[in-house]
Amino acid sequence: MNKTMSESIKEPMNEMKRDELGAGGDRKANGPEKLRYIDAHIHLEQYGEQERSLIFQDIADGIPVSMLLAVSMNLPSCQRTRELYRRYPHIVRPAYGFHPEQPLPSEDELAELLAWMEQTVHEAAAVGEVGLPYYMRTEVEQAGQAFYIQPYIDLLERFIAFAAKHNKPVVLHAVYEDADLVLDLLERYQIEHAHFHWFKGSEKQSNV
């Protein structure tokens, strides 16, 4: 578990660099190659149309960004992310999943989401955003109420199993001690490519 998300999405980056090449694939003689970046985690579908237009205009104007990895929250969010991918296939790469900081889906809702992900798996760059609900759990426990984490672990395992089946990277929401639980699942399913968004684990965890 020491490979980064960027290693698993080299091909989209290579596609983006084709417009920098001259005839025959030779790099254009326009000076040193500029360093380019990947935004590995953006909730693009949550931006307003005007804000998104500004983002794409900035990129067109020369902001050195090669790719936006657009993560999703639930099925409607996945569908909006897919529409953005279809509108901007040269820059947007979609990740489909269910964000953990919200109430659990019903079995019917989960089945519908997973079936939709199966149908669109060929275009997905990753599974995500998925993980465990640290902030929601903390808020409930601070209010003196019990929070049952096991159903969220079971849900996460469904998505990790899906990623393993289709050889997809995973975009993760796993804060502090939750990282150990998630790492165990990743190792169990032999997931080699994962991106922990806003990682707040220990140095030991970061070196796994």
Image: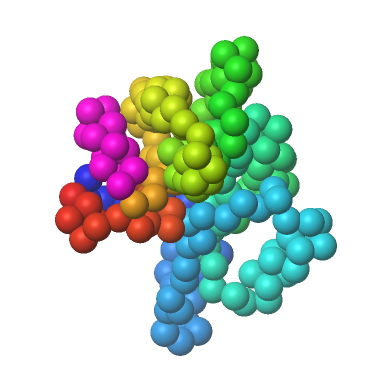
Which of the colour schemes (rainbow, by chain, secondary structure, one colour) is used?
rainbow
Q: Nearer the viewer, residue 35 or 148?
A: 148
Q: Residue at x 21, y 60 (%)?
A: 203
Say which residue appears at 43% left-offset and 58% top-offset: 198
Q: Tell me residue 32's x, y (percent).
A: 42, 84
- Tally of numbered tags: 0
Asked if residue 69 lies in the magenta stretch, the reply is no
Vertical relation: 55 (above or below) 177: below
* 25 and 151: which is toward the camera: 151
Which residue occupies the foreground of this view, 94 or 201? 201
Position above or below: 106 against 44: above
Does residue 7 lie above or below 159 as drawn?
below
Q: Where does the N terminus fall, quadrant-wise?
A: top left
Residue 128, how many percent across, how many down? 49, 40
Q: Residue at x 35, y 58 (%)?
A: 200
Name the residue: 52% across, 28% down: 121
What kind of secondary structure does the magenta stretch mostly adopt?
A: helix
Where are the magenta residues, as a range? 177-193
Q: Looking at the picture, how far across and down is residue 165, in whole percent?
A: 36, 23
Residue projecting furthest to the front: 144
Which percent across, then down, holds residue 184? 24, 35
Can residue 180 be seen in the rendering of this structure?
A: yes
Which of the 4 quarters of the picture holds residue 188? Answer: top left
Q: Is residue 119 visible?
A: no
